[in-house]
Amino acid sequence: DTEVTQTPKHLVMGMTNKKSLKCEQHMGHRAMYWYKQKAKKPPELMFVYSYEKLSINESVPSRFSPECPNSSLLNLHLHALQPEDSALYLCASSQDRLVIFGSGTQLSVL
Amino acid sequence: GQQVMQIPQYQHVQEGEDFTTYCNSSTTLSNIQWYKQRPGGHPVFLIQLVKSGEVKKQKRLTFQFGEAKKNSSLHITATQTTDVGTYFCAGRPSAGGTSYGKLTFGQGTILTVHP
């Protein structure tokens, strides 16, 4: 298995909703990431987990809450988002400096 | 902080023409990776360059890493309509020593190929 799997692929939520994005990889990678990507822009790093511990938080607002339940899973909990948070959210994993991206969750906040 | 500049931002070519995108880093890189993102898709890993002066080829694609490990290029020979998409370079700083540290993306080059 050489994939990073993300669910759901699309998500529409209101500003008062709570939702979660899920990411899974079975490549044995020990680093996992959340990126945010706006249209026609490069991915922006949000969080890095290394060996299931949060190692980098790029000053992301607290309405985004990451969680790493085990070495294969990464979640991003969403609460009280704003319309400007609408974007493609990409999960990635890496080993030996090679970063592999999932297909992303296209999020729309109404 | 580290910056990776990528040019051009847009490139329109006729099918069969060549295409090149360039990346320049403000700091020395430990490695550089190239990704392709189709419209509506996600970044797909193309290649990683690690060594100073390294050149790698994948069919019509040629990737170079500069001698100083601060710049890189992607050249496509005889473009096809399937080459359409955004090409991103992404570099990891040489300082720091961690294998999972920050990957800084260039702004991307959006390639359009006219049949």
Image (cartoon, grey):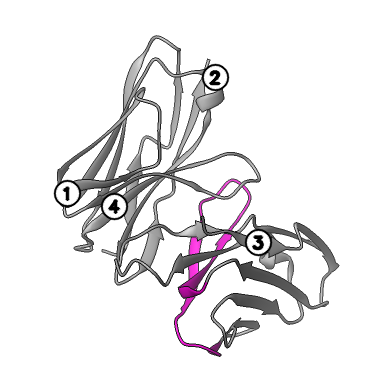
Asked if the stretch drawn in magenta spans residue B34, the answer is: yes
Residue that label 1 marks: A52
Query: Residues in magenta?
Result: B28-55
Q: Are marks 2 and 1 in contact (CB under 8 Å)?
A: no
The answer for how far apart the CA atoms under marks 3 and 2 are is 29 Å
Q: Can residue B65 be seen in this view?
A: yes
Q: Identify the mark at residue B5; answer none if there is no mark.
A: 3
The answer for how far apart the CA atoms under marks 2 and 4 are is 26 Å
Where in the figure is residue B42, as x and y percent of width and height?
A: 51, 51
Position of residue A100 relative to residue A46, above or below, is below
Q: Residue at x 40, y 35 (%)?
A: A59
Q: Which residue is drawn at 71% across and 70% down?
A: B21
Q: Which amino acid does the dot numbered 1 rest on?
A: Glu
Q: Mark 4 lies on which chain?
A: A
- Name the secondary structure under disc 4: strand
Q: Do the residues labelled 2 and 4 touch (CB within 8 Å)?
A: no
The answer for how far apart the CA atoms under marks 3 and 1 are is 32 Å
Q: Which chain carries label 3?
A: B
Residue that label 4 marks: A32
The answer for how far apart the CA atoms under marks 2 and 1 are is 30 Å
Q: How crowded is mark 2: few (under 14 residues within 10 Å), some or many (20 or more)?
A: some
Q: How crowded is mark 3: few (under 14 residues within 10 Å), some or many (20 or more)?
A: some
Position of residue A105 relative to residue B107, above or below, is above
Q: Which residue is drawn at 44% across and 49% down?
A: A103
Q: Which amino acid does the dot numbered 3 rest on?
A: Met
